[in-house]
Image (cartoon, rainbow, N blue to C red):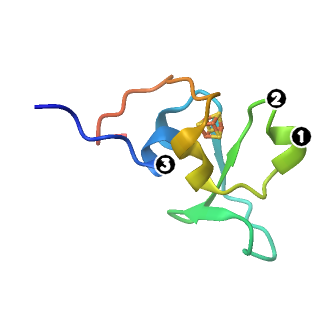
Amino acid sequence: MGTAPMTPEDRHRVCWYSRRTSHLPAEFGLHTIMDGQLLYCAHPMLWPIVGYEFDVSNCAQCDYFRQARSASPSR
Ligand code: SF4
C-alpha cells in the first residue's frame, strides 16, 4: 500500500521555499490565499519573476521543491 501523493497545497506547506504573509493584496486575481494568508514562494529563481502573484497549483510539478518540514497533518 503506497502513500497518497501530496497535493500542491501540501507541497507548498512543507517546502523550504514556501512563505505566507497576512498582508493581503488589494486585488485577489492572480494570488493564492489560504486560511486568511497570502501564499508565495521565496525561491530565488521564482520570487523575482512571480513575487506575490503566486499560484500554488504550480507546486505540483515544481522541480525546485525541497522538503523542509514534516508533511504530518498537525502542521
Ligand atoms: S513553487 Fe516550488 S520552490 Fe516554490 S514553494 Fe512551491 S514547490 Fe516550493
Mark 2 CB within 8 Å of ligand 1? no
In the displayed structure, would residue 52 be above or below residue 49?
Answer: below
Q: Which mark is residue 8?
A: 3
- Disc 1 from disc 2: Cα separation: 7 Å
Depth check: give the residue in front, 2 or 19: 2
Type of residue at label 2? Pro
> Mark 1 near mark 2, Cβ–Cβ under 8 Å?
yes
Q: Look at mark 1 in the image and give the residue it sits on.
A: 48
Q: Position of residue 34 (x, y in %)?
A: 53, 62
Depth check: give the residue in front, 4 or 31: 4
Q: Measuring 72% from the left and 55% from the top, which residue is drawn there?
A: 54
Quarter occupied by the C terminus: top left
Q: Quadrant of ligand 1?
A: top right
Q: Is residue 25 left or right of residue 75?
A: right
Mark 3 CB within 8 Å of ligand 1? yes
Q: Which mark is residue 44?
A: 2
In the displayed structure, would residue 11 be above or below residue 63?
Answer: below
Q: Residues within 10 Å of mark 3 (few under 14, many from 20)?
A: some
In the displayed structure, would residue 29 be above or below residue 49?
Answer: below
